[in-house]
Image (cartoon, rainbow, N blue to C red):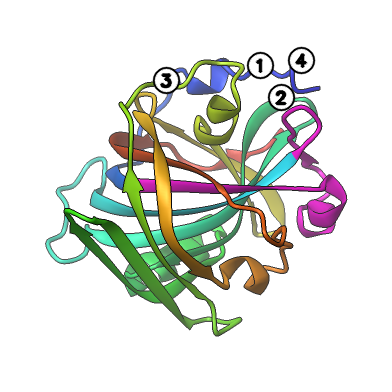
Amino acid sequence: MTREIDRIAPTLRPAGRVAMRQRWSELLFLHWPVAVEAIRPLVPEPLDIDTFDGVAYVGLVPFTMSGVRFAWAPAVPGASRFHEANVRTYVHHRGRDPGVWFFSLDAANALAVRAARRFWGLPYHYARITLDRSAGGIAYRSERLWPGPTPAGCDLAYVPEGTPTASRPGTLEHFLAERYILYATHRGRLRLGRVHHDPYPLQPARVLRLEESLLAAAGLPRPPDVAPLAHYAGGVSVRVYPLRPAT
């Protein structure tokens, strides 16, 4: 199934109006392999678990959002920049439209959390989050405040290494990072959202410290004694398109 799914079409800029514009930066992609059976009960049945060589993955992605605004309005000072961390897996809908299913999204902006929960049906949580960048690397800490389950958060540090480059289609890096479709259940219906940006400038990352409870809070297994695959991307400018029914 992995080879049959069109993974290039979702990376192309879609037609239609842009709903929002934003920038994602300081992205760390942490991924663990998991059995499909372990996450199948946590994903709505209309969606199929997407796999690479028969293996499913769960991801933890901390990053920073900035310049967040509606496409027709300027950014609001004090509300357009905040840190976020999402827990996710990868899905497709009946053999097409490979995308992301979010188990949780923790963000340090209460207004954004309320809006995303109400208008997008996404499982956002308000969290206290800090990011510190120094010559020794990047440190990221989050602590979920509401709604539960709590406690949930992460405390990690890492160093980007190597040369940034776009991943090649067909590789595991491309499978994990180049996702331009999200799914959400909103008002009882499965919805699909699109984003568009240049390919991520990916580079390896060396994890110096990793403590997290976000996966467990989402009911997800994390393989014991298995180091995550770690990749870093400096940033991309993003167009966000409205939700539509996933048909």
Tag 1 residue: 6
Q: Is residue 135 above or below residue 177?
A: below
**Residue 13 bears which disc, if any?**
3
Q: Which residues are magenta?
A: 27-55
Mark 2 or mark 4, which has the lower sequence index? 4
Residue at the image point whose x is 56% and y is 84% from the top? 150
Residue type at mark 4 is: Glu
The answer to the question of whether label 1 and label 2 lie on touching residues, with beta carbons closer than 8 A, is: yes
Residue type at mark 2 is: Arg
Mark 3 or mark 1, which has the lower sequence index? 1
Q: Decide which of 93, 162 is in the foreground and name it.
A: 162
Name the quadrant containing residue 15. Answer: top left
Mark 2 or mark 3, which has the lower sequence index? 3
Closer to the observer: label 2 or label 4? 4
| Mark 3 to mark 1 CA distance (whole Å) | 15 Å
Tag 4 residue: 4
Mark 3 or mark 4, which has the lower sequence index? 4
Tag 2 residue: 96
Q: Decide which of 153, 163 is in the foreground and name it.
A: 163
Could you classify mark 2 by the number of other residues whose Cα lies within 10 Å: few (under 14), some (14-19), or many (20 or more)? some
**Residue 159 horizontal/vertical position (percent):** 32, 49
Give the side of residue 29 with respect to residue 52, left or right.
Answer: left
